[in-house]
Image (spheres, coloured by chain):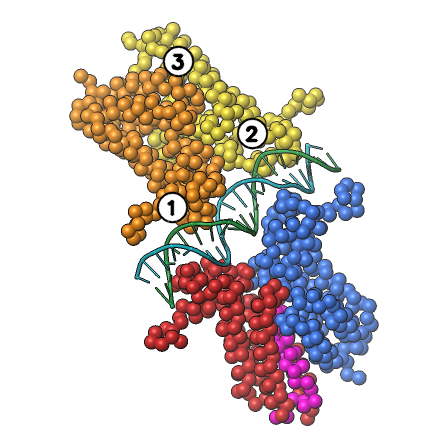
Chain colours: A orange, B yellow, C blue, D red, E green, F cyan
Amino acid sequence: VRGKSPHPDSTRTVILEVAFAEIYRHGFQGVSVDEIVAKTPFTKGAFYHHFPTKLVLGYAVVEEVLMPMMVQRWVEPLALYENPLVGIACQMDLLIGHAAPSVLGTGCPLNNLVQEMSPIDSGFRRRLQSALVTWISGIETHIRRGQSAGFIDPTADAGQIAHFVVLMHEGIFGMLKGLGKPLAFQPLFASVKQYLRSIEAPT
Amino acid sequence: VRGKSPHPDSTRTVILEVAFAEIYRHGFQGVSVDEIVAKTPFTKGAFYHHFPTKLVLGYAVVEEVLMPMMVQRWVEPLALYENPLVGIACQMDLLIGHAAPSVLGTGCPLNNLVQEMSPIDSGFRRRLQSALVTWISGIETHIRRGQSAGFIDPTADAGQIAHFVVLMHEGIFGMLKGLGKPLAFQPLFASVKQYLRSIEAPT
Amino acid sequence: VRGKSPHPDSTRTVILEVAFAEIYRHGFQGVSVDEIVAKTPFTKGAFYHHFPTKLVLGYAVVEEVLMPMMVQRWVEPLALYENPLVGIACQMDLLIGHAAPSVLGTGCPLNNLVQEMSPIDSGFRRRLQSALVTWISGIETHIRRGQSAGFIDPTADAGQIAHFVVLMHEGIFGMLKGLGKPLAFQPLFASVKQYLRSIEAPT
Amino acid sequence: VRGKSPHPDSTRTVILEVAFAEIYRHGFQGVSVDEIVAKTPFTKGAFYHHFPTKLVLGYAVVEEVLMPMMVQRWVEPLALYENPLVGIACQMDLLIGHAAPSVLGTGCPLNNLVQEMSPIDSGFRRRLQSALVTWISGIETHIRRGQSAGFIDPTADAGQIAHFVVLMHEGIFGMLKGLGKPLAFQPLFASVKQYLRSIEAPT
DNA sequence: ACCTTCGGGACACCCCGTTTAT
DNA sequence: ATAAACGGGGTGTCCCGAAGGT
């Protein structure tokens, strides 16, 4: 944050966002630095001024773009719902069931990177693991709130539920991507709702 | 099938298996033809004698190695169990819960390729989709058998259940890969069993 | 020229010789692989088929081009002279004093590489050291012959003389290169002859 | 020398000295501007404020660091000796024979640059030539003094001797660098002394 | 004036998947 | 079935200029 400029570090930010979009679509190994800079108004010289290597760019994308996005999309909105189980189902229906078909074919950005880079590079592994844990922890907090508020079976293990909720998100993304048919969402979503009902507090 | 040789097409088979192993670990884009042939007793010339391009090799790996393997590991063993729900749980516990930790870090071969290649190449997409559908259909057959035999709620949608069962498999693989801790299997497995119980036939 | 040709591996040889010439003129660090291949009828792909890295090419140039050349130019011709001291002086006069001025400005190939690469890379250092030792040993053999034949003071240390003879060769090359005036050869050569006279056998 | 500042031109001086040291070890082409500035407390911007190009820096290193150093190390000390031949031998023994082994492996700064840059760039060539001539002239002055004082054969050509003395310095540096063994100094030094004796004034 | 951050392209070395000649 | 050759592209570095703060 330098001086009075309104766009303090726009170059870096622009590169990060473009890189995120390209990595999202072609994978980290499938994108070249040339392709990324070609989609920005800058050159490779500017790129390597901000990021020493492509790998470091990848790390920055995870930390500065992907992780905040996961929290913003999947955790924070839950605060708007009194019953977190309702929130989870509604958000899933909203962000996946009603998403553009093109997005569904590309899957979940976090899941994509986990599948591709976790076994290859430990730097990625650590950061992606951290993102996953953050996501799960965020869900867990809301599950506990739902237990306190009497919506969820208080004897259930909140952490275990949170893990499974995230698993179902990743699983849905993966299945839609693999099946290539957005229509597959409804049956899968039905099973999700059935699971969520099974952990409601007994009335 | 060349005549008197006891290993009719050993070259092609060896390449396929080596390629499968390398692709499994580094991804399709992360492996080079050189690396693959270096792990076989053959040369690059032999490689291009059997496969016109790297992409065609990838297709052959999916069709001739990966897809049979999925059926053999996840569908056929279910025939050994009277109750398919028990079979699903037992196989999952056996092949994932008791697998070597190194395998868990590399995930599910099918899921890996789906995540990496489905959005990039339509040839891969079709073949991987076909593999997924085959897997799901195989499960569905056993689910129907379980309904007929009175183990599973007969009013449930067998196809929907089969989809979710596969989703849970891929989800577990993905979560274990992302969390990097094989210990995460037990809590996830607990949720899987809870779901399976929820679709049992009412007694 | 391929097949039953008497030059079975011409590509590698051509690259080696072109590389030697370029390195001779611009130094190893001063030449790019692109420049080298541009001066051959081949492409970069062919280059990296024969040499895994630029460094390995450099090693091969030392071993396969430079070292044989030193022996051929500075050691073998001495066999033609009954008195090796005469041979040393005549060869020096012939190969340096009457060489094209352009050659003198570029110095001695061995000395050039020693100055540039010895302190930087141990692989170069070992090979260049070996070339120097070979040169010195060759000279020493002829010095001993001269002692047996009664031309050289038999009490002198043949190895020490050989070292100094090589030193004078490198020194002359270096001075001519540094002074940039081929005319400087005569006074330097006069001192060389004076030294050689000082080790003649006493009459 | 700028007036009231206590460090008149420290930035430029610091860069020059760091550059000299780096060029000494890796050669001019082997050092990058980045490496040089990284070893100073300044940035690349400061560098290019003082030196328009890397080449100009190289020229400045020759003129302002290397050349004064040569005079100071190899010419001025000779004034301390009544007999310049003794001075030459003693200084050589002192500055080479008793130098740290690490220095010997890096050779003579002047010689290094001559070998590397003289054939490549005329600006370097002129300046290095000038440095060499200065060195030789300095030696020649002392040789004449030695002739007047009766230590050196008065019929000898002082310029020729001076050239050969410098040749021997460069030759020794080159041989030690190439052979990689500081132990080689003694035999070489013995030959040097023998040459020096051969030009003594006849008694 | 001095120094810094930022950016620009050209080019470095090396590897890629592939074809051709043998 | 092979070794040799092919180019185009991979990441990263090079030297340097531009705009602006102190």
- Subunit under mark 3: B
Whole-angstrom CA distance, mark 2 to mark 1, is 37 Å
> What is the x, y in percent for residue D142?
59, 86
- Read off the residue under disc 1: A11
> What is the x, y in percent for residue C197?
74, 80
Q: Are marks 3 and 2 on the same chain?
A: yes
The quarter of the image holding the C terminus of chain A is top left
- Read off the residue under disc 2: B55
Residue at 61%, 28% (x, y): give it.
B51
Asked whether residue D186 appears in the rendered view, the answer is: no
Q: Amino acid at mark 3?
A: Gly
Residue at 62%, 88% (x, y): give it.
D144
Circles 3 and 2, Cβ within 8 Å, touching? The answer is no
Q: Are marks 3 and 1 on the same chain?
A: no
Q: Considering depth in this image, is C133 or D34 the residue closer to the camera?
A: D34
Q: Nearer the viewer, mark 3 or mark 2?
A: 2
Q: Compared with residue F19, is residue A87 higher up or lower down, i.e. above or below? A: above
Q: Which mark is residue B159?
A: 3
- Magenta-highlighted residues: D149-178
Asked whether residue D45 appears in the rendered view, the answer is: yes
Q: Which mark is residue D182?
A: none
How crowded is the residue under tag 2: few (<14 C-alpha within 10 Å), some, or many (20+)?
Answer: some
Q: Amino acid at mark 2?
A: Leu
Q: Considering depth in this image, is C81 or A112 the residue closer to the camera?
A: A112
Q: Nearer the viewer, mark 3 or mark 1?
A: 1
